[in-house]
């Protein structure tokens, strides 16, 4: 079943934006009468039928809104320093959306090699992953900010900082408890500086390990995301 995204989706006749229209008509080759699904990215999935297969302003009829399957009782957030190679950050965004994540925070720190991102491009990656994995909720991605600004923000739940250090032996999977809201901080390729870790701890972050393997930034972020989802799905 084909999937499209329309944030303002509601029951009735609606026109898709140009980019979504082009994808439906040119790429998916939908015709008048084609049935598919549309999500609003906020938890609802609608039945859709193509009314006018126009590549710039396709018209659809929406009905039967249903709650998506991708709801959970906890909040899962990952904060990640953008990688030098932007493709690696986009890979993380795609896979984390497939696995299931609520919010993604971007920050730059002492060892960061990338201090600029293209928000529009990253949003497109999230939307594409949402549609591919048939999700109903689009993860929220926040603007890039400094590490010092980020760690001082309030968060209602457990806060962890994954740090590669011989003195850090507590595993995230053993420290985190099922059902807890959780925010995991993942550093850049050069890891966090000791001063940054100290600042994070002052602001309520707990140091944890993701295991013995030395992981790249995007891999570490995905391991954290998957571990938390898996723990919460276990009986």
Image (spheres, rainbow, N blue to C red):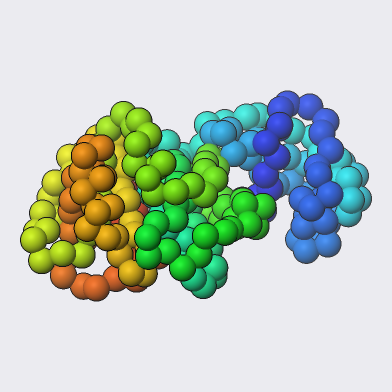
The answer to whether residue 168 is left or right of residue 22 is: left
Would you place residue 93 above or below residue 152 in this image? below
The answer to whether residue 34 is left or right of residue 87 is: right
Give the percent coordinates (x, y) of residue 215: 29, 71
Query: Which is more toward the observer, 94 or 67?
Result: 94
Query: Which is more toward the observer, 2 or 137?
Result: 137
* Residue at the image position 67 percent from the left and 36 percent from the top: 7
Give the percent coordinates (x, y) of residue 73: 33, 32
Give the percent coordinates (x, y) of residue 148: 37, 45
* Residue at the image position 65 percent from the left and 29 percent from the top: 64
The answer to whether residue 15 is left or right of residue 234 is: right
Query: Which is more toward the observer, 182 or 54?
Result: 182
> Image quadrant for the C terminus?
top left
Residue 189, image quadrant: bottom left
Q: Is residue 95 visible?
A: no
Would you place residue 141 above or below residue 212 in this image? above
In the current view of this chain or complex, which residue is farthest to the top? 11
Residue 233, image quadrant: top left
- Disc tally is 0
Give the percent coordinates (x, y) of residue 29: 81, 61
Would you place residue 174 above or below residue 63 in this image? below
* Residue at the image position 33 percent from the left and 56 percent from the top: 186
Q: Is residue 164 visible?
A: yes
* Residue at the image position 18 percent from the left and 51 percent from the top: 207
């Amino acid at each position: 079943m084909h999937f499209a995204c329309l944030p303002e989706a509601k029951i009735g006749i609606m026109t898709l934006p140009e980019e979504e229209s082009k994808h439906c008509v040119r790429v998916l080759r939908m015709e008048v009468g084609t049935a598919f699904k549309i999500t609003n990215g906020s938890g609802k999935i609608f039945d859709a039928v193509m009314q006018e297969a126009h590549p710039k302003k396709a018209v659809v009829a929406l009905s039967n809104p249903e709650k998506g399957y991708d709801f959970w009782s906890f909040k899962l957030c990952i904060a990640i320093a953008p990688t030098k190679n932007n493709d690696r950050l986009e890979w993380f965004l795609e896979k984390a959306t497939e696995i299931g994540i609520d919010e993604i925070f971007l920050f730059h720190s002492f060892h960061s090699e990338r201090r600029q991102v293209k928000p529009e491009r990253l949003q497109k990656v999230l939307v594409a992953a949402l549609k591919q994995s048939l999700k109903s909720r689009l993860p929220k991605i926040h603007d890039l900010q400094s590490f010092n600004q980020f760690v001082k923000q309030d968060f209602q739940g457990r806060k962890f900082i994954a740090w590669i250090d011989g003195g850090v032996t507590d595993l995230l999977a053993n420290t985190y408890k099922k059902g807890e809201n959780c925010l995991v901080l993942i550093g850049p390729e050069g890891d966090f500086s000791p001063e940054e870790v100290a600042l994070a701890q002052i602001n309520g972050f707990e140091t944890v390990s993701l295991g013995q393997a030395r992981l790249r930034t995007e891999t570490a972020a995905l391991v954290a995301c998957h571990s938390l989802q898996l723990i919460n799905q276990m009986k």
